[in-house]
Image: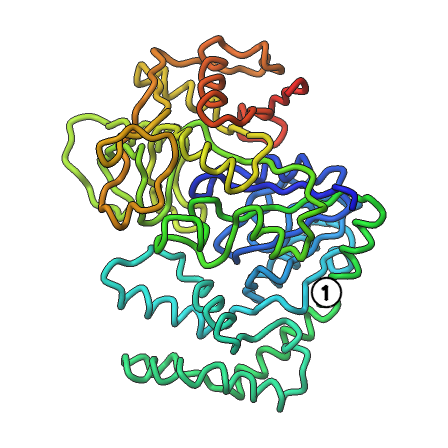
Amino acid sequence: MDKCVTVIVGTKWGDEGKGKIAAREAKDANLVIRATGGANAGHTVIYKGTKLALHLVPGGIVYSQTTCIIGPGTVVDPDVLCSEITMLENCGIPDVKNRLKISGRTHVILPYHKDLDELHEKMKEHPVGTTKRGIGPCYSDKDNRIGIRMYDLLFPKAELKKKITEATKLHNQAFQKNGMNECIVDVNNLANHCQSIGLKLKPCITDIAPIITDNILNRKKIVVEGAQAFRLDLDHGDYPMVTSSNPVTAGTLCGAALPPQALKTVIGIDKAYNSRVGNGPFPTELPVSIDSNGNVMEYTKPLEGDIIRELGHEYGTTTKRPRRCGWMDAVILRSAKYTCGIDYLCINHLDTLGEIGNRIGYVKICVGYSYQGNIIHFYPDNIELTHEVPKPIYKTLNGGWTIDSSCKTYDDLPELAKKFVKIIEETSNIPVKYLGTGPANDDLIVREDV
């Protein structure tokens, strides 16, 4: 089987800037696929100078030659999807509904899933910190085999009502028991709503297998835009502080309905510093004067975490919630290499890290851990059992750097920036092929010799 698939994966906790490489790889792709997660993910793409925030439609839709697929491994909020389609059409992107294909097997997020998300988070002693967009409950219904799929939206109303009734029996009891009577599902109204959505999306809902088969047989380039990241994977991440799908490479291939034999390249994406949204372990996290919950700490001057957050603009795109911030952890990259099969790295925000170094006076890279009395060079999977977060062992580079518009190649970079890259490569055992040097998609150095 010809190898024609490029998979883009996040290497930490998301927000690594996957859209920059996704846009680059999609320029000459025939097929672009979104495979996991829901509207809790996505990225910004630029079309004729206009920024477009996409959460479900693959960013490759802006290139007229691409067919874009939403795979069966995703869960789709149909209201968000319809809004995105309308936005794309209003921006003049051609043939959106003809080029967008939604697997009929894709599961649908409905209003009661969002209500359940709110209820579940409220009842947990240690909330995960979900986006409350109904993604986890929708995947749970999928696992319980009571989920509503895209194909179901096309059923006659009587058959659709039966499916919704079956799906919401236990949910309605939970709402009633917890005093959430306003959330109890009116099956008839919801069936009407689902049918109206089905009518809108009918041109896009299809069997994607023949499309994928044709592209593989004809050796067409296929790009899979990864969502979330390695440490958020349901099986391989920081459970239970994880997402509800499998965003590692193997899970992404499965969610895209792609065979592993067709995989050609895996590109791992990270930032030159690290950040995390929500709860869970973060070995290189730095102190801040305002935490991610908005609590203000009393300090006389900005802390390291404050400086990284401000210079990196580390606030949620939708929620504006401040992100947790810390130094680059190259040890996690080493673990990601072998779990995700990463061939090359893209390190974004190299320019930002230089500014951070200029402001603070130094830059740090985690190259090992002190854990349970030992020095280790992998990310342990028993943190919850030991109740110990690995303590980072750092290499420190004194000073920072400035990357201006004249920097077009790796050789043009300041020596300290190149030393930073070399430490990442030596620690992770992954070559760094791409370096993000600014906010625009074209602010990218590509090392052709790597």
Give the image location of residue 230, x and y in percent.
47, 44
Q: Position of residue 71 (x, y in %)?
A: 64, 59
In the picture, which quadrant includes the C terminus?
Answer: top right
Q: Secondary structure at mark 1?
A: loop
Residue 446 x %, y %: 63, 22
Residue 305 in the figure: left or right of residue 351: left
User: 18 above or below 122?
Assistant: above
Decide which of 367, 142 is in the foreground and name it: 367
Along the horizontal axis of the image, is 98 left or right of 426? Answer: right
Considering depth in this image, is 131 or 379 the residue closer to the camera? 379
Graded by Cα atoms within 10 Å as few (under 14), some (14 to 19) or many (20 or more), the crowding at tag 1 reads: many
How was the colour assigned to the protein in this rendering?
rainbow
Relative height, residue 433 to residue 287 (above, below) = above
- Residue in view at x 67 percent, y 17 percent: 449
Give the labeled residue for mark 1.
204
Expressed as whole percent of the image width and height from the top left, the position of residue 264 reads 69, 39
Which residue is found at the position 37% from the left and 38% from the top? 379
**Residue farthest toward the right in the current orientation of the protein:** 218
Q: Is residue 47 above or below residue 312?
A: below
Name of the residue lying farthest toward the front: 374
Q: Image point 27% across, 50% down: which residue?
A: 384
Q: Is residue 449 left or right of residue 312?
A: right
What's the amino acid at mark 1?
Answer: Cys
Say above or below: 114 vs 270: below
Q: 22 or 263, which lies in front?
A: 263
Location of residue 431 (image quadrant): top right
The number of callouts visible is 1
Residue visible at 40% across and 53% down in the picture: 242
Closer-to-camera residue (24/267): 267
